[in-house]
Amino acid sequence: MTRAFVAGLLLFAFCRTFAAEGAALVIAGATVIHPEREAASAVESDQTLVIVDDRIRAVGRSGSVAVPEGARAIDARGKWVIPALTDAHVHFDQSGSLYARPDIADLTFWQPYATEQARNRSRIEITLRAWAASGVTALIDVGGPHWTFELRQRAKQLPWAPTIAAAGPLVSMVARPQLDLGDPPIVQVKSSDEVRKVVQDTLRYRPDFIKVWFIHQPGDDLAQQEAIVRAAGEAAHAAGVRLAVHATELAVAKAALRAGADYLVHSVEDAPIDEEFVRLARARDVAYCPTLFVHEGYALALSNRWQPTPAEQRLADPQVLTMMRDLDIIPREKLPAWMRRAIEQSWGGRGSDHAYANVRRVWDAGIAMVMGTDAGNIGTLHGPAVFREMARMVQAGLTPLEVLRAATINGARLMRRDAGAIAPGDVADLVVLDADPLQDIVNTSRTRWVVKAGRAFEVDALRAQMEEGR
């Protein structure tokens, strides 16, 4: 088709939602970024994308691509297009607010945990809109109550909602009774037989992962714990399900890899990774998720120093943003002594230096790195937390292009999706940005349109729907 025809398409009065099922969508004149490529060939200007149904049909220089008659069009001149993001570590049973984890910060005297959970579940569509508006079209819930499996199915019925993978309850060496309201997100096991029983119960829900919360405390028998993790992995693998493991110390992470972990959901925080770790990780073809911001989020929130970023002001659940200021109104004398000290001393800071340094080491070792926020934990808000996390990954030594690779193609591969790249045949999950993310990774927050399975949604419309649900 000619440039004139493409230009004519751009004169359409744009709808807020484009391309009903079966219609074609054209994104014209964009600068396209291909995160899976090397830097020299990653950026292509003046590109036109043709999307039919849920797939990319063609990508090429504007004027050289055949545009279907009657296609809807987005004028993307002066804008950037990237693959949509995958957050590979979230928890839907947690809101990100001060009340999300009473096992860590007990504020139930001010808001009961049952009230927090009911509020969280009642606003789950607003949470999903926050993710979509942030350019995230795929999520892995790596541990939560059984109702997260219902959410996985519910999201499939909402055309704008991200695709969800779910692990169900975490298998743990420790108990968290504060979180048990009858459908506990964490189940304690003390033996290999117990863990096999829990895994078999979870397998009835067809989980995407089985998750072990591998907590090793002084005096614990690491070999015995490794045997429990191995039993979980064997039961999961026998059913064709992968094993995700929380293991934040080097010795514990290596034990998890020996036991069959496929996915390490946190960075190693206590020491530099070593050759044994690299060898084990390569042998398992493991995925590695740094989650750099989450500790900082706790520190800022619980010392009353947390402030929303511009992206959070624009894209987060407005109700959660309001709740983040509740330490201004809770009487100081009612707070735990350690929290009063945290506020008085402005306690806080970023996560461990080892966690940051290991990001570059893991990347250079050729281990598949994904981006994940641990969203839902206190101070790490669903949706725009991805922008804080990606900024921390740049601070840890990755380039913006490498961070995008972790957040797009690598995350899509972990979820076994035909997405994460901008190429013919791939699922059309894309984001149209107002600024160049390779100049500043925070420009990924400048979302204008998000395309989910071939259907385009204006971010301002998603935001308005969130505001209506305040």
Image (tube, rainbow, N blue to C red):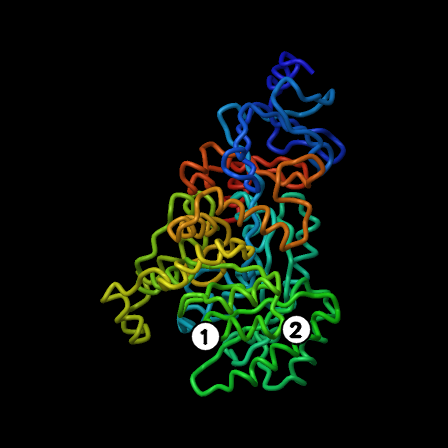
In the rendered image, the quadrant that contains the N terminus is top right
Is residue 99 something one can see in this rendering? no
The quarter holding residue 334 reads bottom left
The quarter holding residue 99 reads bottom left
Q: Sequence order check: which comes first, mark 2 or mark 1?
A: 1
Residue under numbered circle 1: 103
Residue under numbered circle 2: 233
Answer with left or right where residue 237 lies relative to residue 402.
Answer: right
**Residue type highlighted by circle 1:** Asp
Residue 226: percent from left, percent from top:
57, 80
Residue 172: percent from left, percent from top:
56, 77
Distance from Cα at disc 2 to Cα at disc 1? 27 Å
Q: Nearer the viewer, residue 231 or 89?
A: 231
Q: Which mark is residue 408?
A: none
Image vertical order of residue 192 relative to residue 237, above or below: below
Residue at 55% x, 31% y is 32
Which is in the foreground here, disc 2 or disc 1?
Answer: 2
Residue at 61% x, 61% y is 285
